[in-house]
Amino acid sequence: MWRFAFAMLLMAASLSIRADGTVVDKVYHPIVLPNEHRVEWRFMSRQTEEKNILAQRIGYGQSLSETVTVEFYLLGERDRDDNFGIEAYELESRWMITEQGRYWADWGMVFELEKRHGLDAWEASAGLLMEKEFGRNSLTLNWFSIYEWGNDIQDEWEGEFRMQYRFRWKPQVQPSLELFVGEDFVGIGPALMGIQRFEAQKQLKWELGFISELSGVTKDHTLRFVLEYEF
Amino acid sequence: MDRLMRHFPAFGLWLFAAPIWAEVPAFELVLKDHLFYPAKVEVPSGQKVRLIIHNQDDTPEEFDSFDLNREKVVFPQRKATIYIGPLKPGTYEFFGEFNPHTARGEVIAVEVKDAD
């Protein structure tokens, strides 16, 4: 346990945390299964003193092999005139590096490429994913390194960190605590995830989280919701 | 200090990867006609073990266990290795996702008494 805590500190210290935009998002797990197809809907509503930011995304993904999966997303956001429209497109790939349970922890990577709709603004990111079991508890950590470029955006490097500590109580109800760190943002809050299996590989997964900015100086709460159907 | 920092990446990798150097005990199961043989597998508690599943059917199966927190596809006429544990003494259910009514089984983790 002490070795783990020490390693966490080293990894966190080596991250140059610098990110803008919305930090609260899904915490990725490193496990990939073959022969899977999925559709996904993510919803995020961030409420501050001044405004409400509403973002949603829908995606379709499928496994390419026993260890690699790819997913395509359409991202939508509400603009300053309160109109909701397409904001960006994203291609994402997850790679399971280690066999589940074989080593002290499970490892994976996630790669994302995003383009803003109608703008010359790009974002590429690489994330290291880790999951460690402690009996019926699971600790999942994501470290992201992000680069933004294009004529309509300032070229810059960013970093993000996400953490989820989950108690696997029953398949449908798995309470967790989530932490998100980015530029000028450290948020923490409770979340709930669950899974309902149907026949064969068909299953419905959901996640619901309520994240509050830690400084607490001004109001800054985010409600996030994910619905994922695998088939 | 410089020397320590030079070796820092390798040290970090060692901290996280920490592979299991010792041989992990293996327990073999056969999947035939959508049934697991044996349906109950006794394994020692408190240590990591491998379940090696030989799928003798002509269709794929997905080993699934919420208790063990494992999911793994076993392709037809192939074998798959599933690493589980260390487990506390107790019974852990598993099933085949494609044939959940027939392909069912239990891993029973038992305390191993020291021979001394």
Image: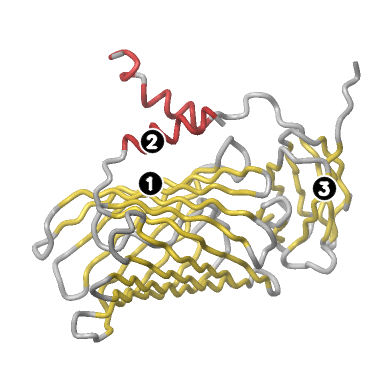
The image's colouring method is secondary structure
User: Helix or strand or loop: what does disc 3 sit on?
Assistant: strand
Q: CA gap, disc 2 to disc 3? A: 36 Å
Which sits in the foreground, A64 or B47?
B47
Give the x, y percent position of residue B35.
Answer: 85, 60
Identify the subunit bearing mark 3.
B
Q: Residues within 10 Å of mark 1 (few under 14, many from 20)?
A: many
Answer with left or right where residue B43 lies relative to residue A194.
right
- Provide residue B14's location: percent of width, then percent of height: 48, 26
Q: Residue A143 shows which numbered tag?
A: 1
Give the left or right position of residue A203, taking residue A144 as reference. Answer: right
Residue wearing tag 3 = B107
What amino acid is labelled 3 in the image?
Val
Please provide percent x and percent y for residue B81.
Answer: 69, 44
Q: Give me the residue at 38% from left, 46% from top.
A: A143
Mark 1 secondary-structure assignment: strand
* Mark 2–mark 1 distance (CA, rounded to whole Å): 9 Å
Toward which corner of the image does residue A185 lie, by quadrant?
bottom left
Q: Residue A11 carries which label?
A: 2
Question: Residue type at mark 1?
Answer: Trp
Query: The disc numbered 2 marks a residue on which chain?
Result: A
Sequence-wise, the earlier of marks 2 and 1 is 2
Q: Position of residue A219 (x, y in %)?
A: 31, 66
Residue depicted at x 37% and y 71%: A73
